[in-house]
Image (spheres, rainbow, N blue to C red):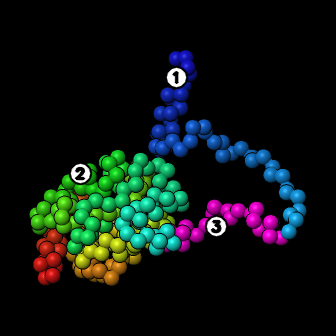
Amino acid sequence: MDSAEYHSALSALTWQIELGVDTCIADEPINRYEVPAKVEKPAAPAAPVAAVAVVAAPVGEVDVVAAARAAAAGAQDLEGLRAALEAFPHCELKLGARNLVFSDGAPGARVMIVGEAPGRDEDREGRPFVGRAGQLLDKMLAAIDLNRDSSVYITNVLPWRPPQNRDPKPEEIAMMQPFLQRHIALAAPDVLVVVGNHACQALLGKRGITRLRGDWTTAEGKPAIPMFHPAYLLRNPAAKREAWADLLALKARLADG
Ligand code: URA
């Protein structure tokens, strides 16, 4: 490649990044405006059965939530569930992610924390809550004598990073919900900590963390307490006061047995 080609490739790449492209999913570009070559009509099949066999279901017709439900239900333990997610072909977030972010902490712990989705640091490491928000979460937990080594298990609603940390889409939450439900059933915690609006949407079917936080409710048959997301607390330190009250409520609940 000569210098002119190099600079024109570089400016094309810069332009794409400015447009929001952050993932390369193939070696060659695909021109989606190109009219596809006309598909030859096959000769009449010898028997009706053969005709059925050659018609593939269009991708749009796959019921991805039903597929997720079936894949999740087949998992008999946490490793099986991780493998089911690794093999799940219907979530496009996977294409742009470096790693599956399944969980961290102590499986079987009394407390299970459900966050939103991996960010850049989590995507790199393949573990939830390892960036700045995660460091704050660890400090909050330590303040009530909890930690990932022995007393807390952590996951997210989405196991793959959304591009540029955008919010999870409702259809992505719906698709991953059966995996989350199975995850909770297999991890079998005593209580759930539902962190932020997207986790509330997935587990409680509603948003409005400012109103919901601190009030015990039930999710997946477990006592659950919604709390502010630590990323929100980083942006709004004044809300740490409420977060502290919620942590004390969690501590009291655990002490009650
Ligand atoms: N925010 C989340 O909700 N989850 C993570 O894993 C990291 C940041």
- Residue 164, how many percent across, how many down? 41, 49
Examine the rendered structure and indicate whether residue 2 appears above or below residue 203. above
Residue at numbered disc 3? 61
Task: Give me the residue at 43% from left, 50% from top.
Answer: 97
**Residue type marked 2:** Arg
> Looking at the picture, which amino acid does disc 1 mark?
Tyr
Dot 1 alpha-carbon crowd within 10 angstroms: few under 14, some 14 to 19, many 20 or more: few
Left or right: 203 in relation to 251: right
Q: Earlier in the sequence, mark 2 or mark 1?
A: 1
Name the residue carrying label 1. 6
Q: Which is the main secondary structure of the residues drawn in magenta?
A: helix
Q: Which mark is residue 132?
A: 2
Q: Is residue 199 left or right of residue 153?
A: right
Residue 145: x and y in percent read: 11, 66
**Residue type beneath disc 3:** Glu
Of tags 2 and 3, the one toward the viewer is 3
Question: How busy is the neighbourhood of tag 2: few (under 14 within 10 Å), some, or many (20 plus)?
Answer: few
Instruction: Tell us which disc is closer to us: 1 or 3.
Output: 3
Picture quadrant of residue 55: bottom right
Cα distance, mark 1 to mark 3? 43 Å
Q: Which one is earlier in the sequence, the residue at label 2 or at label 3?
A: 3
The crowding category of the residue bearing disc 3, from other C-alpha atoms within 10 Å (few below 14, some 14 to 19, many at least 20), is few
Which residue of the protein is positioned furthest toward the top in this rendering? Answer: 2
Bounds of the magenta segment: 48-69
> Whole-percent x and y of residue 140?
16, 62
Q: Give the vertical position of 216 relative to 140 (above or below).
A: below
Q: Position of residue 24 (x, y in %)?
A: 51, 41
Task: Report whether 166 appears left or right of 248.
Answer: right
